[in-house]
Image (cartoon, grey):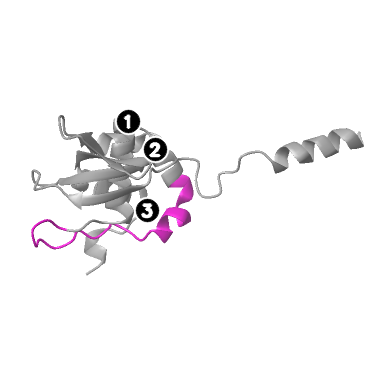
Amino acid sequence: MNKILILFFALTMFAPVHAISPYTIPDYSLEAAGTGVQGTYLVRVWVMTHMKSVDDVDFKKAAVHGVIFRGFPGAGGAPSQLPFTQAADEQEMREYYDKFFSSTFLQFAEVVPASYAREKVGKGYRIGAVVLVQKDELRRELEKAGVIKPIASVF
């Protein structure tokens, strides 16, 4: 019996642990990519990777994550777009965002065809794509879920 307990504890000690979240967000940066239609953001997402390509799902995930938690600089002197909420709120509402970033986020982003770019950086790559983010719909979804405050409550 003692051997079984020792084996159990040894196996659980070395099991992978999702310290932050079970979903993974790629290493990315965002920048404005022009103007989209009203209610949307058009952003260029740059993903840093050692792979030669990036899946569209990763571009969408990074774009939505960036709009919610990071914001991005404006183009050509335009003001920066502030994030919807603070990065610390991701941990506070972890259960919601775990579920959200497993699939729900996909309905709020679309990769613009023929917008891909790739640059060699050191031993890896910086791969980009333009993503259209449905910012108004995304904000409504997060407000409805109670994870961010409505804009009207800020004033």
The picture places residue 51, in percent across and down from the top left corner, at 37, 33
Residue shown at 41% from the left, 36% from the top: 102
Task: Identify the residue at the far right of this view.
Answer: 1
The part of the chain drawn in magenta is: 74-96
Label 2, label 1: how far apart the Cα atoms are: 13 Å
Q: Is residue 76 left or right of residue 94?
A: left
For mark 2, does the 10 Å Cα neighbourhood hold few (<14), some (14 to 19), or many (20 or more) residues? some
Whether the magenta-drawn stretch holds residue 12 is answered as no
Q: Quadrant of residue 26?
A: top left
Q: Which residue carries the number 3 mark?
A: 147
**Tag 2: amino acid:** His
Residue at mark 2: 50
Where's residue 70, x and y in %?
31, 56
Q: Amino acid at mark 3?
A: Val
Q: Residue at x 49, y 46 (%)?
A: 21
How many marks the image carries: the answer is 3
Q: Is residue 82 above or below residue 100?
A: below
